[in-house]
Amino acid sequence: MDFLSILLVLLQAFFILFILMSITWLIQLRTNNAGIVDIVWAISFPIFAIFYFFISDGFIFRKQIFLGMVLLWGLCLGLYLFIRNTGKHEDVRYSKLREEWGAKASIKMFFFFQFQAALATVLSIPFLLIMNNTFEKISLFEYFGMGLWAIALLGEAIADSQLKAFKKDPSNKGKICECGLWYYSRHPNYFFEWLVWLSFFIFALASPYGWIAIICPAMMLWFLLKVTGIPMTEELMLKSRGEAFKKYQESTSAFVPWFKKK
């Protein structure tokens, strides 16, 4: 598959998500809750994987394996976000954006949603490369990618369940979660989510032009560490938890699970 063919398929994929995000934007206009974009973002990747599966000419067994990986991860993430957001007020992140944008909030939110569509399309590049790999043998890169993906999925599920159990206990109200994986990292859920993207990149290394997929874990790492992930979350936690969260920051790794600082 040459560069022009890859570009044309990505444009088709973006158009599909452009329509979906436009519908999502219309829904949030009625509900006044932009948090729905998180759910659509998660399920966009299974949609891409299915689309690439049917239009690609790669080795069918590889395509089936990778489709299963993306479906399980993306649908689990989408379901988790759906359960977390349903019946709740709009996430503080989006309420803050509405305040900053003022009278232009609606139109700016539309472009924000479409930026999400463009970003998801770029992040789907390894999916397309893998689905078009015609080599009829699963390589060591792909086995290693599958293994890392399984570890990442399990780690993220454990981190989410530990945080959920902590919040469910009324005696923990106003406290910092330092149980399980949260003892070793302030954001273990983000770390394991990033590992999923790293596993996709490693899996793609066995495919022609697979090295291009490095853009995915690199972009996700930048967003998590510098933009919408850790900085925004910790800003909110400092406001709500104050000195207790400062002490947590001083003693606990921000991202990679590691031993406490003395």
Image (spheres, helix red, strand yellow):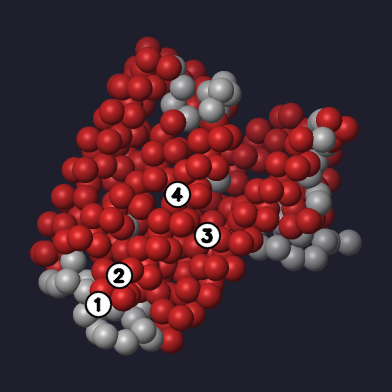
The quarter of the picture where residue 80 lies is top right
Q: Quick one: label 4 or label 1, which is nearer the N terminus?
A: 1
The answer to whether residue 130 of the structure is visible from this angle is no
Graded by Cα atoms within 10 Å as few (under 14), some (14 to 19) or many (20 or more), the crowding at tag 4 reads: some
Rounded to the nearest whole Å, what is the CA distance between mark 4 and mark 2?
A: 18 Å
Q: Earlier in the sequence, mark 3 or mark 4?
A: 4
Tell me which corner region of the image, top left, top right, bottom left or bottom right, holds residue 1: bottom left
In-front residue for pair 261/177: 177
Query: What's the residue type where badge 1 is placed?
Result: Phe
Label 2 sits on a secondary structure element that is helix
Q: Is residue 202 above or below residue 115?
A: below
The residue sitting at 21% across, 50% down in the picture is 13
Instruction: Residue 220: give x, y in percent of width and height.
Output: 46, 56
Q: Are the two marked residues, 1 and 2, in contact with CB atoms closer than 8 angstroms?
A: yes
Q: Residue at x 81, y 51 (%)?
A: 179
Earlier along the polypeptide chain: callout 3 or callout 1? 1
Looking at the rendered structure, the secondary structure element under dot 4 is: helix
Closest to the camera, between mark 3 and mark 1, is 1
Label located before the other in sequence (3 or 2): 2
Q: Amino acid at mark 4?
A: Leu
Q: Position of residue 246 (x, y in %)?
A: 79, 42
